[in-house]
């Protein structure tokens, strides 16, 4: 495969990852972390770039990717987990969020206040999802549309905005808020969940591998190698963008008065370039959200066409588009209300599955290790998700609260380690029993 092909696939991967969450959360982190910015950003990049990169790597190592990794726990778990992931990063959460943000930033700022917002959102959604559907119908041309055309325009727009921002915004970083004073790195680590990119990487793995295979690459080692190269390109660009817009948020002197990252970036763009800045920012958000929706729709279509062989790829893409269109009209706040608790539950499971994949050879693919680790992790990850949703855990809260790292939202770490140790001990015991039986038969 040519180096230029690798570059374009890397740019396509960047455009698929780079959506609403990637633009919304870094400015807020910058404004709230203040002088603790670099430590907080390091935690953010670890889960928003490093973890997705690790997921892509793990998916490329095994045949059938994420499904095979889930099967190591149990086929039923694999199906339930992967369906939940695809539905969440697809039509139920991520796609509606991106479409809604594209409207909020790309069109709403230019509307007359007398216009009916719900009606305009509906009309915008019709056009937006019609384009998503058309582009998603032909995955083979995604590299051409997204890697060669849309992504360069998106990156150029970001360069213009960030360069002017660094030239004109010279305010020093402020005092960190209480959360970032207590633990900047762990707070940034948790905030990185909100990009949903680690879960998206489970889905995008199949799209990237398909794109590489279409270039004539079939050897597993070469597939892994080219996937890593594309991941480095995408991850490097994502990290650069996060740091840049995070610093813009940190250098906006009144950023703390804004409710969301969209507000911070809108104010910064207006300050830097006037109405032209708002138009430029609208272009950035619209392109970013559009490419992510196309990537997610394509991934869902490819996955569910394998799960439901009777349904064609085109039919499933249409179904994903219709559901995404319907939910996008609920409004951004309603979507975010349900997405965060799900992410707090799903991310720990993703982290341990990927970690176990890398150490798989040390415990010889033992199902007991996978099952025990996922069980212990899942219980406490679910507790964290329910707490984030606002439910009272009752006596369970005292159990959760005494665990190490619970104040940072990482109470699942120690149970995960305990589960892995128990699984290793159980698998070791089984091997001893099998060895004893073999010796007894031979004797």
Image (spheres, rainbow, N blue to C red):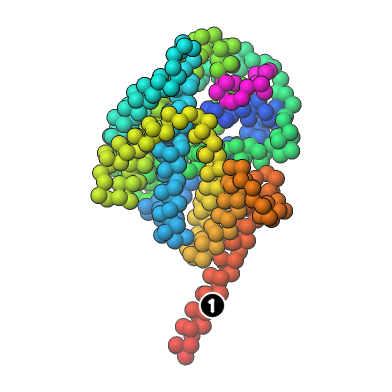
Q: How crowded is the residue under tag 1: few (<14 C-alpha within 10 Å), some, or many (20+)?
A: few
Spot the residue most to the bottom.
443
Question: Which residue is nearer to you in this view: 1 or 272?
Answer: 272
Q: Quadrant of residue 202?
A: top left
> Is residue 256 within the magenta segment?
yes
Q: Residue 107: x and y, percent?
A: 44, 17
Question: Residue 300 appears in which quarter of the rendering?
Answer: top left
Q: On the image, which quarter does residue 78 sit in?
A: bottom left
Residue 30 in picture, x, y percent from top left:
64, 27
Looking at this view, is 60 or 142 the one in front? 142
- 386, 33: nearer the viewer: 386
Relative to 439, residue 393 above or below: above
Q: Residue at x 30, y 46 (%)?
A: 305
Examine the rendered structure and indicate whether residue 249 appears above or below residue 435. above
Q: Is residue 228 visible?
A: no
Residue at figure coordinates x 35%, y 38% from the top left: 320
Residue ID for mark 1 = 432
Q: Quarter holding the N terminus?
A: top left
Q: Secondary structure at mark 1?
A: helix
Side (left or right) of 392 relative to 361: right
Whether 275 is among the magenta residues is no
Q: Main secondary structure of the magenta part?
A: helix
Give the residue drawn at x 31%, y 27%: 130
Residue 57 horizontal side relative to residue 163, left or right: left
x%, y% of residue 58? 46, 50
Number of callouts: 1
Q: Residue at x 66, y 35 (%)?
A: 40
Q: Position of residue 191 (x, y in %)?
A: 60, 37
Confirm whether residue 25 shows in the render: yes
Q: Which residues are magenta?
A: 250-265
């Amino acid at each position: 495969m040519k180096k230029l092909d690798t570059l374009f696939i890397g740019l396509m991967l960047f455009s698929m990852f780079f959506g609403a969450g990637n633009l919304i959360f870094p400015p807020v982190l910058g404004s709230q972390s203040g002088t603790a910015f670099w430590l907080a950003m390091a935690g953010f990049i670890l889960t928003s770039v490093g973890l997705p990169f690790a997921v892509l790597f793990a998916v490329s190592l095994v045949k059938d990717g994420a499904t095979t990794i889930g099967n190591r726990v149990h086929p039923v778990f694999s199906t339930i987990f992967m369906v939940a992931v695809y539905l969440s990063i697809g039509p139920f959460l991520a796609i509606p969020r991106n479409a809604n943000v594209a409207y909020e930033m790309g069109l709403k700022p230019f509307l007359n206040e007398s216009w009916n917002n719900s009606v305009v959102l509906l009309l915008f959604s019709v056009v937006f999802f019609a384009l998503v559907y058309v582009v998603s119908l032909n995955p083979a041309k995604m590299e051409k549309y997204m890697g060669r055309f849309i992504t360069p325009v998106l990156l150029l727009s970001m360069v213009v905005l960030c360069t002017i921002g660094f030239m004109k915004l010279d305010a020093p970083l402020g005092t960190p808020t209480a959360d970032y004073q207590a633990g900047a790195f762990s707070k940034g680590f948790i905030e990185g969940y909100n990009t949903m990119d680690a879960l998206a990487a489970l889905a995008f793995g199949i799209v990237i591998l398909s794109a590489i295979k279409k270039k004539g690459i079939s050897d597993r080692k070469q597939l892994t190698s080219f996937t890593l190269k594309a991941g480095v390109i995408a991850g490097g660009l994502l990290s650069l963008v996060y740091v840049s817009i995070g610093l813009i948020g940190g250098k906006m002197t009144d950023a703390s008065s804004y409710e969301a990252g969209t507000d911070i970036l809108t104010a910064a763009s207006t300050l830097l370039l006037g109405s032209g800045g708002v138009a430029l920012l609208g272009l950035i958000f619209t392109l970013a959200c559009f490419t992510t929706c196309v990537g997610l729709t394509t991934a869902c279509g490819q996955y569910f066409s394998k799960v439901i062989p009777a349904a064609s790829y085109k039919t499933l893409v249409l179904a994903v588009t219709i559901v995404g269109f319907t939910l996008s009209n609920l409004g951004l706040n309603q979507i975010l209300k349900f997405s965060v608790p799900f992410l707090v539950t799903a991310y720990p499971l993703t982290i341990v599955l990927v970690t176990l994949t890398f150490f798989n050879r040390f415990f010889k693919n033992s199902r007991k290790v996978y099952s025990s680790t996922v069980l212990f992790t899942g219980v406490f990850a679910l507790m964290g998700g329910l707490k984030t949703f606002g439910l009272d855990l009752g006596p369970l809260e005292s159990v959760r609260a005494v665990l190490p790292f619970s104040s940072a939202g990482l109470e699942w770490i120690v149970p995960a380690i305990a589960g892995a140790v128990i699984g290793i001990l159980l698998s070791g015991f089984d091997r001893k029993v099998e060895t004893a039986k073999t010796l007894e038969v031979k004797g």
